[in-house]
Image (cartoon, rainbow, N blue to C red):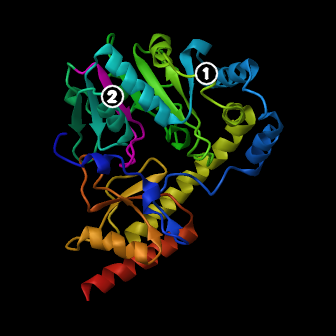
């Protein structure tokens, strides 16, 4: 392992930070559960759980993704969450003898999976303000992983900058788990771009609060996707997962997504204004549904985060992300009431520690 977070730290996830009965800024899932229409849609299929998922259900879900992104069915791979995509990519890299470069700071699961599979990994650590420079990626890397927007920095890279990583003979994996709620999705996503070796991972669990269902998909180079599917078990997605794909990619859901997107942008802008007014340092202008901040200068960051937790505020620690340290915290975008509770706890902890 290179210098930086330990293996256990790389495997850390925000749900470990949750405080019983507290306010959750640690987990990047919007809301406590799926909207009523989606619950009803899923509930309508409960009577079908006595049988195996059907070919018709699978084909309909694939067709929904293909229509959404303007690709053929062979350019779609349905997944049990984006996490399964990282697992399959790691196995693909091991079979093909690929050498990987992972752009950091970013979601750590891709590196965990690559190392689990015995794949060599170079870390490309972006300095502040964490903007992607393709020239920093080693030329010998024939697998590159980057997030867009990037978790936890909330940086959204230009579409052409990410596309510059693609070339024949290289697999380029773009984690777009949060791209559906950026202000200009069409201008930033590479899903459907048709570039050689490109694999775009999408999650339905964040925006639609389906984390417990584990559902997502990949869009990209058909040859790479076919290899990713090698040796998968029969029925890798269940009936409810397939129904969720169809529901969340239906035209009616797209219309609701526009409303959700506008709400995320408005809540983020209000949250940033409240944080800055309270003297809470926002590291970079955020463009995703989370904000990267720093703990007060001169204070023990670990003790400060623990103090927030005692006051009922769960935050995502930053020191498990290569390129960051314990002074960084990631905060999920929340509504005004929750942000006010965060600000009160932050001020109380800050002033209490200084006495």
Q: Is residue 243 left or right of residue 326?
A: right
Q: Which mark is residue 234?
A: 1
Residue 66 appears in view: yes
User: In the picture shown, does residue 51 fall above or below 2?
Assistant: above
Query: At x 72% / y 22%, what residue is drawn?
Result: 60
Where residue 299 sits in the image (x, y, percent)?
23, 74
Q: Is residue 157 left or right of residue 139?
A: right
Q: Which residues are magenta?
A: 141-157
> Could you tell which of marks 1 and 2 lies nearer the N-terminus?
2
Q: Which mark is residue 117?
A: 2
Where residue 297 sits in the image (x, y, percent)?
22, 70
Magenta residue check for 153: yes
Q: Which mark is residue 344?
A: none
User: In the picture shown, does residue 222 fall above or below 307?
Assistant: above
CA distance for labels 1 and 2: 22 Å
Query: At x 37% / y 44%, what residue is drawn?
Result: 155
Please state which of residues 266 and 39 is positioned toward the viewer in this rendering.
Answer: 39
Magenta residue check for 216: no
Please state which of residues 75 and 57 is positioned toward the viewer in this rendering.
Answer: 57
User: In the picture shown, does residue 210 fall above or below 114?
Assistant: below
Q: Where, by quadrant of the figure, is residue 352 drawn? A: bottom left
Mark 2 element type = loop
Query: At x 30% / y 52%, what residue is drawn?
Result: 320
Mark 1 element type = loop
């Amino acid at each position: 392992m290179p210098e930086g977070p330990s293996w256990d730290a790389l495997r850390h996830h925000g749900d470990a930070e949750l405080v019983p009965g507290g306010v959750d800024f640690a987990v990047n899932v919007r809301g406590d559960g799926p909207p009523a229409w989606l619950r009803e849609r899923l509930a309508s299929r409960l009577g079908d759980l006595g049988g195996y998922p059907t070919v018709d259900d699978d084909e309909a879900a694939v067709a929904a993704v293909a229509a959404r992104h303007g690709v053929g069915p062979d350019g779609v791979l349905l997944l049990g969450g984006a996490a399964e995509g990282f697992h399959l990519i790691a196995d693909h890299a091991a079979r093909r003898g690929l050498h990987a470069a992972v752009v950091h700071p970013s979601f750590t699961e891709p590196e965990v999976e690559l190392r689990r599979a015995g794949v060599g990994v170079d870390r490309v650590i972006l300095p502040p303000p964490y903007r992607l420079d393709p020239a920093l990626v080693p030329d010998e890397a024939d697998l590159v992983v980057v997030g867009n927007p990037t978790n936890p920095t909330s940086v959204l890279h230009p579409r052409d900058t990410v596309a510059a990583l693609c070339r024949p003979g290289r697999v380029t994996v773009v984690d777009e788990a949060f791209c559906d709620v950026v202000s200009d999705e069409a201008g930033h996503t590479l899903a459907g771009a048709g570039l050689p070796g490109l694999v775009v991972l999408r999650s339905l669990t964040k925006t639609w609060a389906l984390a417990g269902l584990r559902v997502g998909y990949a869009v990209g180079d058909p040859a790479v996707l076919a290899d990713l599917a090698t040796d998968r078990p029969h029925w890798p997605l269940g009936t409810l997962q397939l129904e969720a794909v169809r529901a969340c990619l239906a035209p009616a859901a797209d219309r609701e997504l526009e409303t959700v997107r506008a709400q995320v942008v408005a809540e983020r802008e209000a949250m940033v204004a409240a944080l800055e007014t309270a003297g809470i340092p926002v590291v970079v202008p955020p463009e995703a549904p989370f904000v990267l901040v720093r703990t007060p200068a001169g204070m023990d960051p670990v003790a400060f985060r623990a103090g927030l937790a005692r006051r009922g505020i769960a935050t995502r620690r930053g020191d498990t992300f290569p390129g960051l340290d314990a002074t960084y915290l990631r905060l999920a975008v929340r509504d005004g009431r929750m942000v006010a509770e965060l600000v009160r706890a932050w001020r109380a902890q800050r002033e209490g520690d200084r006495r």
